[in-house]
Image (cartoon, grey):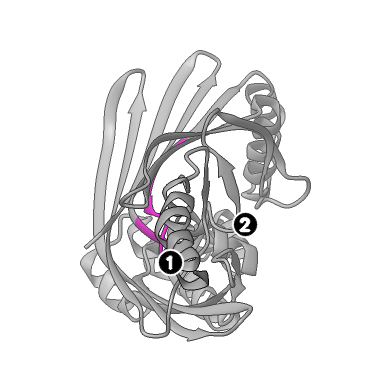
């Protein structure tokens, strides 16, 4: 009789218990499930466009391949090797001769760590990258100038704040390795997908001093629980007055000054917005498609200009 009762319990109650288990469709957790040797190739495309009074004046595109490779895994962290092509040389219009001279700075291996959940923690070999970057900025003034001491001095002064930014740990992480920041952006949190998430944000001020105030909004557009795949829209709008403060600070460091200069900057208007589309396999934690578009609108005494920088990261 006991055996019959046991069989009855197993055959009747157990299936009903499991049949009542439902998938939580109100939240998504971003936790990395990686192993040593996991490797993903990405195609990275960068498009820089500039308009002046509504007319497109510049449109430059660069493409390269980057590799995400898990080289170590512990109970509390992952170590990642990110191999990519350094795009500093594409920031300026160099001659082929200059590009050849600076070609030794083209490729970089970046070693960085994340938490056990995939949150970015920091670059391990940033000092090595900083040294290479300093050498690059030291050589550039003489290579791109007319060769006169006065011209070299002027270029060095103009480039100094950028050299400082690109040679610091924070500058390398946020600017040189912006793609890494994008890939790891959502990790380490559980998100309520039923409504938009709005919050006060702060953006690093690379000119030094207080960060830039901003407003951000994050929305889950689509979630496929069977495929464990989701799409996120993330918009950040920088505070206009705070943006003006930082731009003025940077321009002054570049040597721009004078009464007329101050007057022009005082009346200027800055509108900076970043829109990101992020698509992930949230299990095991792999970015499939990311597009980040930063739009900068500047109005200086009625002289309106606009710049749009778009970065696209696609899993190959």
Tell me residue 31's x, y (percent): 52, 61
In the orientation shown, which residue stands out farthest toward the front?
1
Q: In the rendered image, which residue does mark 1 sit on?
A: 7
Q: Magenta span covers which residues?
A: 275-287
Q: For the C terminus, which image quadrant?
A: bottom left
Q: In the rendered image, which residue does mark 2 sit on?
A: 161
Seen at 52% across and 66% down, the residue is 149
Label count reads: 2
Answer with the quarter of the image where residue 35 lies: bottom left
3D distance between C-alphas at marks 2 and 1: 76 Å
**Element carrying mark 1:** helix
Q: Nearer the viewer, residue 85 or 24?
A: 24
Q: Earlier in the sequence, mark 2 or mark 1?
A: 1
Q: Is residue 7 left or right of residue 157?
A: left
Tell me residue 128's x, y (percent): 54, 83
Q: Is residue 268 left or right of residue 58?
A: right
Tell me residue 180's x, y (percent): 46, 62
Q: Is residue 284 above or below residue 200?
A: below
Q: Nearer the viewer, residue 20 or 40?
A: 20
Q: Nearer the viewer, residue 296 or 111?
A: 111
Seen at 36% across and 84% down, the residue is 37
Q: Is residue 132 above or below residue 181?
A: below
Q: Is residue 66 above or below residue 131?
A: above
């Amino acid at each position: 009789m006991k055996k019959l009762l046991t069989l009855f319990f197993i055959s009747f109650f157990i299936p009903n218990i499991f049949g009542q288990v439902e998938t939580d469709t109100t939240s998504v957790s971003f936790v990395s499930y990686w192993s040593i040797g996991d490797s993903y190739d990405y195609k990275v495309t960068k498009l820089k466009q500039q308009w002046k009074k509504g007319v497109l004046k510049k449109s430059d595109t660069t493409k390269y391949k980057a590799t995400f490779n898990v080289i170590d895994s512990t109970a509390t962290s992952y170590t990642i090797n990110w191999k990519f092509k350094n795009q500093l040389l594409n920031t300026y219009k160099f001659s082929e001769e200059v590009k050849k001279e600076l070609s030794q700075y083209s490729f970089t291996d970046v070693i960085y760590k994340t938490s056990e959940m995939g949150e970015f923690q920091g670059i391990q070999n940033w000092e090595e990258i900083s040294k290479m970057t300093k050498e690059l900025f030291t050589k550039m003034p003489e290579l791109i100038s007319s060769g006169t001491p006065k011209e070299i001095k002027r270029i060095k002064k103009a480039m100094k704040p950028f050299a400082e930014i690109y040679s610091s740990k924070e500058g390398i992480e946020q600017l040189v390795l912006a793609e890494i920041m994008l890939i790891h952006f959502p990790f380490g949190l559980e998100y309520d997908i039923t409504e938009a998430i709005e919050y006060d944000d702060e953006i690093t001020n690379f000119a030094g001093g207080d960060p830039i105030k901003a407003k951000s909004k994050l929305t889950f557009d689509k979630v496929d629980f069977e495929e464990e795949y989701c799409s996120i829209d993330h918009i950040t709008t920088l505070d206009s007055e705070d943006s003006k403060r930082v731009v003025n600070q940077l321009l002054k460091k570049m040597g721009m000054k004078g009464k007329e200069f101050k007057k022009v900057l005082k009346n200027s208007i800055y509108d900076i917005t970043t829109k990101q589309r992020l698509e992930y396999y949230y299990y095991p934690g792999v970015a499939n498609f990311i597009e980040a578009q930063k739009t900068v609108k500047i109005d200086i005494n009625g002289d309106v200009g606009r710049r749009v920088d778009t970065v696209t990261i696609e899993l190959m």
